Image: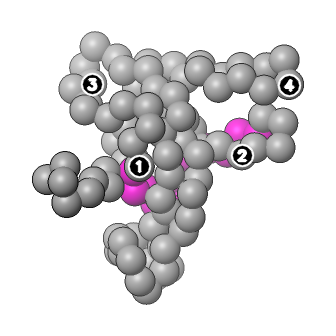
């Protein structure tokens, strides 16, 4: 759940809310989504698993998704993306987590 200015967002089952951290082009994490070749890194802020979802994602994980995936939501001065679990293409982990 994300709270701001007397509003809160609780994602529906099968969705997660991500704070966009940065977009990557030509360096770092690179996921090829076609001509624009842009991936985005975000921080999971809230999620709601459904009965069919077997994800290992949790709040605080850094994930990779396409720049144009999901819908944008603004709460106060902060912007978030609402995504389906299927739009997440990877989870960033440190070498210690491997």
- Camera-side mark, 2 or 1: 1
Magenta residues, start to end = 63-74
Callout 2: 10 Å neighbours few (<14), some, many (20+)? few
User: Contact (CB < 8 A) between labels 3 and 1?
Assistant: no
Rendering coords of residue 32 (x, y %): 35, 74
Q: Earlier in the sequence, mark 4 or mark 1?
A: 4
- In terms of secondary structure, where does tag 3 sit? loop
Q: Say if 84 sits above or below 48 in the image.
A: below
- In terms of secondary structure, where does tag 2 sit? strand
Callout 3: 10 Å neighbours few (<14), some, many (20+)? few
Q: Main secondary structure of the magenta part?
A: strand
Q: Say if 82 sits above or below 92 in the image.
A: above
Q: Which mark is residue 93?
A: none
Q: Which mark is residue 53?
A: 3
Q: Earlier in the sequence, mark 2 or mark 4?
A: 4
Q: Which mark is residue 79?
A: 2
The reply to whether residue 83 is visible in this rendering is no
């Amino acid at each position: 759940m994300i709270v701001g200015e007397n509003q809160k967002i609780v994602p529906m089952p099968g969705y997660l809310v991500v704070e966009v951290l940065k977009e990557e082009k030509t360096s770092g994490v690179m996921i090829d989504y076609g001509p624009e070749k842009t991936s985005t890194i975000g921080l999971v802020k809230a999620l709601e698993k459904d009965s069919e979802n077997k994800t290992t994602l949790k709040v605080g994980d850094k994930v990779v998704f396409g720049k144009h995936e999901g819908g944008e939501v603004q709460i106060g001065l902060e912007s978030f993306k609402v995504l389906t679990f299927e739009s997440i293409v990877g989870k960033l982990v440190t070498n210690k987590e491997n």
